[in-house]
């Protein structure tokens, strides 16, 4: 029989995974941005402060650009090692080298202040820009894929370098005679796969291995201006044909 | 004999001996097994009773037999702990199985329990033998020594062993940009010599919010 | 071998023209190439009557036909995936645990009661998935979902395996099932409730058990 490996401050990894679900950050007088509620244990002298703390003004100016999201984040600073985890989801770190990566807001746990965090123009996503490390959670390990690729919206964790995804509707579904009928009667059923995000060009797409989404973190509202996606009333877009709901639920589909 | 089959299923080989396990956690067995509900009364029995503020709940069965019995509970990860005369403190809901060499009891834990939302009593396991504890995601075992005290979020704490003192500590202050939602967060500070087991997940807590 | 296990929660399938596959609706995570996903009104094979039969039997998990040329990644709900390769024998599995499978496999529906008698019916109620179980027969691969990963337990003559119906995932081989109960188990979990029974599997083959009593 073998028990679990025992760690102490010397044997805990520095800025690396302890196991698939736990990541250890080492602070040496440095700072990290942390989503509230994700620190499970620490050794050493580490302080946690809301980012509204006055002396972080400079830090926030350079690294935090998601104003209405601010209440969900704290700054950890000091010296020691702290363990991060998120509801037993898989956790991984990513290094950006003068790069950019856009990630679903609910998946981001922590990042180094050398990176700048900004709201993506794609609603529900955040973009990290610069050089540094960040930690993200996913439902199942993250799989990296290269375009061209079509992805179920719910399996998408994020993407790096490539241009924003566009929507793709299955041709057969759009033109199918059954299309209208299906949507209303449930007979025949929609395949559930009529709609994907399509990625083209050079870059990397990050996929999570399941379609169970993690709770989305608010990324903050965008200014109510013409030309800004999501600036209208949220969630009032036109119904997609075949969208689940309506009659289909009555048929148990 | 305890062994893990995968990380989420405990296989126990029995040759006429008995183990205590969380009620209903058997998922399969071969050979012959007898199950007995552990009801109140009697020393070792009352021990593992899960006591909660809201009442008491029997949670343990005794399994005797010849063959292999498999235990699992809601896809929790399982860690094996060997005890050699020392004492393991574990949240009742995180204890899956103990072998016949171990005695179980209940200890009053006071404040921590109320903040972690998981009862005022903690289960203790002592003697020489094997215990299987459960966690939401793989548990991490962290050593506490004189020069290295450890701070743990109450919601992530599942068990500890050794000679440890716990201090309930508040003092993490949030002042948010909005000037609202400021709150205090609680942590447990462990000092002494021993091991603390944490899980990569948090129960809903009243206090812990870092 | 049409399934490549990418990790414990994701498999990749190569789709070749002329060889179709079936998958649960909504289980596609990503694909490349020209692949079409067509909802399947017939429940795979066997015509409309079979579909109606299955729906009444509460086994009408909507399937889609996957055809074309390319690769498809499958996964669903964060569940663990077990790939089971069949070499001529029959797999018994509840339909909503099927993630994807080879189109060459012959689908059927089996009334569990026919093997287990009255006990078989109870089993259906116990696992809450109806009295019918899907069967897949032939040569090919099946990707099955389970909560928290599965263990495979061999079943051999003289070595029957008892499984908590809540944790039962699938079985294959020449196996008979019936309900039994261990001494003391019913008293413990409550008399009269279906949970007082185990599924007893005997013969030769294997049973897959998940590390959880939670249904999908």
Image: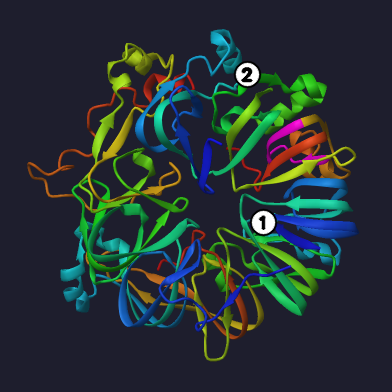
Which residue occupies 32% across, 73% down?
A32
* Depth check, front residue: A235 or C124: C124
* Depth check, front residue: C50 or A48: C50
Task: Write down the residue under mark 2.
Answer: C57
Secondary element at image label 2: loop
- Horizontal side of B190 relative to B82 (left or right) equals left
Report the span colored magenta.
C161-173
Which residue occupies 56% across, 15% down?
C45
Query: Which quadrant is home to the C terminus of chain B?
Result: bottom left
- Horizontal side of C199 relative to B90 (left or right) equals right
| Residue C32 belongs to the span the image colors magenta | no
Chain of the residue where label 2 is placed in the rendered structure: C
Task: Write down the residue under mark 1.
Answer: B55
Q: x, y (%) of residue B39? A: 82, 55
Secondary element at image label 1: strand
For this orientation, the residue located farthest to the bottom is B147
Q: Are labels 2 and 1 on one chain? A: no
**Is residue B40 visible to us here?**
no
């Amino acid at each position: 029989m073998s028990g679990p490996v025992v760690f102490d401050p010397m044997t805990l990894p520095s800025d690396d995974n302890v196991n698939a679900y736990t990541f250890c950050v080492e602070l040496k007088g440095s700072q990290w941005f942390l989503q509230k509620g994700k620190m499970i244990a620490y050794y050493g002298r580490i302080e946690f402060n809301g980012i509204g703390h006055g002396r972080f003004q400079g830090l926030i100016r350079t690294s935090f650009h998601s104003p209405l999201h601010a209440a969900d984040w704290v700054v950890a600073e000091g010296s020691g090692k702290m363990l991060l985890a998120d509801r037993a989801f898989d956790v991984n770190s990513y290094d950006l080298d003068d790069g950019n990566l856009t990630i679903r807001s609910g998946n981001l746990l922590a990042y180094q202040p050398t990176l700048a965090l900004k709201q993506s123009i794609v609603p529900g996503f955040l973009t990290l820009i610069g050089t540094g490390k960040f930690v993200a959670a996913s439902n199942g390990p993250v799989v990296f894929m290269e375009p061209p690729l079509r992805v179920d919206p719910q399996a998408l964790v994020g993407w790096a370098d490539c241009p924003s995804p566009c929507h793709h509707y299955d041709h057969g579904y759009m033109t199918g005679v059954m299309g209208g009928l299906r949507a209303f009667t449930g007979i025949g059923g929609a395949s559930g796969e009529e709609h994907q995000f399509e990625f083209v060009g050079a870059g990397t797409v990050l996929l999570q291995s399941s379609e169970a989404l993690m709770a989305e973190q608010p990324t903050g509202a965008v200014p109510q201006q013409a030309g800004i996606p999501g600036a209208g009333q949220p969630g009032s877009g036109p119904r997609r044909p075949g969208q689940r709901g309506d009659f289909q639920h009555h048929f148990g589909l | 004999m305890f062994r893990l089959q995968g990380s989420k299923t405990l296989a126990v080989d029995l040759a006429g001996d008995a183990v205590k396990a969380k009620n209903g956690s058997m998922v399969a067995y071969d050979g012959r097994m007898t199950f007995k509900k552990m009801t109140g009364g009697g020393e070792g029995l009352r021990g593992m009773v899960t006591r909660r503020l809201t009442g008491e709940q029997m949670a343990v069965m005794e399994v005797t037999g010849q063959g292999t019995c498999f235990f699992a509970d809601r896809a929790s990860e399982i860690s094996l702990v060997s005890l050699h005369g020392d004492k393991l403190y574990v949240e009742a809901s995180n204890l899956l199985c103990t072998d016949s060499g171990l005695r179980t009891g209940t200890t009053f834990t006071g404040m921590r329990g109320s903040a972690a939302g998981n009862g005022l009593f903690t289960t203790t396991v002592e003697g020489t033998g094997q215990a299987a504890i459960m966690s939401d995601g793989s548990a991490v075992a962290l050593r506490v020594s004189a020069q290295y005290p450890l701070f743990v979020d109450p919601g992530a704490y599942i068990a500890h062993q050794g000679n440890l003192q716990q201090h309930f500590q508040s003092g993490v202050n949030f002042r948010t940009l909005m000037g609202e939602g400021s709150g205090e967060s609680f942590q447990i500070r462990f000092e002494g010599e021993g091991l603390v087991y944490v899980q990569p997940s948090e129960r809903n807590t009243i206090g812990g919010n870092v | 071998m049409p399934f490549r296990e990418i990790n414990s929660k994701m498999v990749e399938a190569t789709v070749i023209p002329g060889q179709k596959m079936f998958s649960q609706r909504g289980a596609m995570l990503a694909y490349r190439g020209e692949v079409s996903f067509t909802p399947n009104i017939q429940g795979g094979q066997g015509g409309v009557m079979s579909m109606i039969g299955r729906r009444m039997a509460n086994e009408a998990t909507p399937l889609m036909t996957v055809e074309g040329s390319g690769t498809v990644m499958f996964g669903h709900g964060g569940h663990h995936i077990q790939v089971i390769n069949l070499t001529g024998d029959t797999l018994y599995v509840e339909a909503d645990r099927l993630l994807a499978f080879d189109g060459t496999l012959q689908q059927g529906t089996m009334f569990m009661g026919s093997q287990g008698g009255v006990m078989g019916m109870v089993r259906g109620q116990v696992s809450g998935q109806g009295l019918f179980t899907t069967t897949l027969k032939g040569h090919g691969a099946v990707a099955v979902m389970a909560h928290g990963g599965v263990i495979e337990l061999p079943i051999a003559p003289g070595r029957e395996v008892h499984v908590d119906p809540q944790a039962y995932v699938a079985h294959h081989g020449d196996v008979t099932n019936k309900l039994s109960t261990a001494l003391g188990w019913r008293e413990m979990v409550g008399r009269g409730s279906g949970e007082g029974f185990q599924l007893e599997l005997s013969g030769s083959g294997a049973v897959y058990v998940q590390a959880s009593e939670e249904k999908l």
